[in-house]
Structure formats: structure tokens, C-alpha cells
Amino acid sequence: MTYNNSLQFSAVIFAGGNSTRMGQDKALMFGGVERIRQLCMECGIVKIITLCGNEERASLFEGEVWPDPKYCQKLSDVIRWVHREISGPIQFIPCDAFDLDLDSLQALLQSGGGVPLDSNSNRQPLLANCPADYQMGDGSSVNSLFDGLATINIVGLSDGFSNYNEKSQLTERQR
């Protein structure tokens, strides 16, 4: 099923990590979550949810903010929980998608569902586009949750689907 109307989507922004490898809060870098929220609004997405991790982080973000349930022990648990809570198609976005731009996000929304490839041809499951009827995998890893989604290669826009986990990757980004 293809969804070309961004009003149908819920955007879910992951912003609850500790960012220990990066050394600073990725949710606040390069415009942070607010930049991603703005991109979502420019695409016409009405429902934008920021997953903040623990409750103490909720005040860092504007709009609709959800802390992780106490029973969720890892990211795959949080993703499974969110998928059950939201009806309709979901566009997931990690806060460290520093290169995501309007064209890349629009292409994802119009893809009909899937997991995009970044510029290194790696699947980026935290940028998964899940149709409303998607039956999430039952594995314990993030990758396994999205095994049932096609890999999508959006030619010319793959740079927008990279994420950054370590300081050394920022040096490469700035070249």
C-alpha cells in the first residue's frame, strides 16, 4: 500500500539515547530535534512525536513528547511499543540524521514503505517508513523488526539517510 499523503503519517523522532560515543547530546546537535520537527512540518506531517528516553529529558523538546515506558529495556522494545500505540503509517527518524533534508524526507514519505540505504549502501532501519498494515518482526534487534520491509535505494538522496554515532564520523561529514 502506498501513502503519498503526508497528513496520514506520524513521524517518530528517536531522541532518548545517551550519546556516550559522541560525547554530547546528539538530539541537540546541528539544529537537533527541532530541525527534524521543522522538516516534518514542511512535509505536511501533523502528528510528530519525540521519544525522549527517560522522563527527565521531556522538557528538552517541544511538541508531543513521549518518555519510554519503564518496561522497555532496549530500543527494539521501544520501537515495538510505539508501533502498537500508533495507527496509520509511521516515518521513523533518528535525531542523528544530521544530513536529512526536505527532499530526502519527502522521498521517504512517497516511497510506499521500506528501509532506505545510506551513501555506504547500509540499510538504515531507524529511518524506516512503515505502512499502516506493516507486521513488525518479532526479533530482539532493531534490524529484525524491519526485516519485512523492502530496502529502498533513493538515488541521489542517500547522503540524507546517514546517521552519526561517533565524533570521528563528524570529521568525515565536514570534509
Image (cartoon, grey):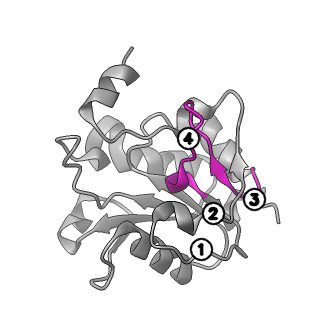
Compared across the picture, whether 101 is left or right of 149 comes to: left
State the image coordinates of residue 130 (x, y, percent, origin top left): 65, 64
Q: Main secondary structure of the magenta part?
A: loop
Asked if the residue at tag 4 contacts the one at tag 1, i.e. Cβ–Cβ closer than 8 Å, the answer is no
Q: Which residue is mark 3?
A: 5
Image quadrant containing the C terminus: top left
Identify the secondary structure beneath mark 2.
Answer: loop
Comes first in the chain, label 3 or label 1: 3
Three-letter amino acid code at the position of disc 4: Asn
The crowding category of the residue bearing disc 2, from other C-alpha atoms within 10 Å (few below 14, some 14 to 19, many at least 20), is some
Q: Which residue is mark 1?
A: 137
Three-letter amino acid code at the position of disc 2: Asp
- The residue that appears at 68% across and 52% down in the rendered structure is 109
Q: Which residue is mark 4?
A: 122
Q: Which residue is mark 2?
A: 147
State the image coordinates of residue 17 (x, y, percent, origin top left): 28, 58
Three-letter amino acid code at the position of disc 3: Asn
- The residue that appears at 18% across and 43% down in the rendered structure is 24
